[in-house]
Image: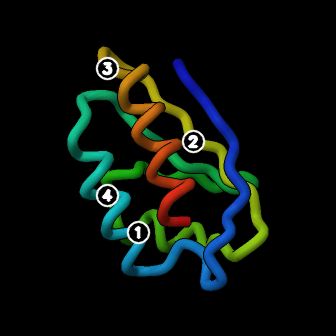
Amino acid sequence: MKEFRYTIKDAVGIHARPAGLLVKEAKKFESKITVSRDSKTAEATKLMALMGLAVKCGQEVCVQVTGPDEEQACEAMKKFFEENL
């Protein structure tokens, strides 16, 4: 399992547009990717679950990646978060 933490810098947080792009990116990998904030967790391939986390600017999320391509998936997720959120 790979894991990293990221503090959201987007002024609106994880809203519809970046959440949709995140889902698309996560679906490229076999590994299971989850995003957590406080005690809530959502699979990165489920748009409404991601938006249900209600992550705002300045809040920290934890991204966990488990599976056969976790190394590549984790790197891709880090890059995605840095470029889009």
Q: CA distance from mark 4 to mark 2?
A: 13 Å
Between 49 and 61, which is closer to the camera in this rendering?
61
Hey, what amino acid is under mark 3?
A: Asp
Residue carrying label 4: 23
- Name the residue beneath numbered marker 1: 19
Label 1 packing within 10 angstroms: few (<14), some (14-19), many (20+): many
Kind of residue at disc 1: Ala
Distance from disc 3 to disc 1, alpha carbons, whole Å, reads 21 Å
In the displayed structure image, the side of residue 45 where residue 58 appears, left or right? right
Residue 64 x, y percent position in the rendering? 54, 34
- Give the labeled residue for mark 3: 69
- The residue carrying pointer 4 sits among few (fewer than 14), some (14 to 19) or many (20 or more) residues within 10 Å by Cα, namely some
- Which element is circle 2 on? strand
Q: Is residue 33 above or below residue 24?
A: above
Farthest-out residue, front: 83
Picture layout, residue 67 above or below residue 60: above
Position of residue 25 measured from the top left corner of the image (x, y, whole percent): 29, 51
Q: Tell me the SS state at disc 1.
A: helix
Q: CA distance from mark 2 to mark 1?
A: 14 Å
Residue drawn at the location 46% of the way across and 32% of the way down: 75
Badge 2 amino acid: Val
Residue contact at pointers 4 and 1, CB within 8 angstroms: yes
Of mark 4 and mark 2, the one earlier in the sequence is: 4
Q: State yes or no: discs 3 and 1 in contact (Cβ < 8 Å).
A: no
Q: Position of residue 11 (x, y in %)?
A: 66, 83
For the residue labelled by badge 3, is the local secondary structure a helix, a strand or a loop? loop
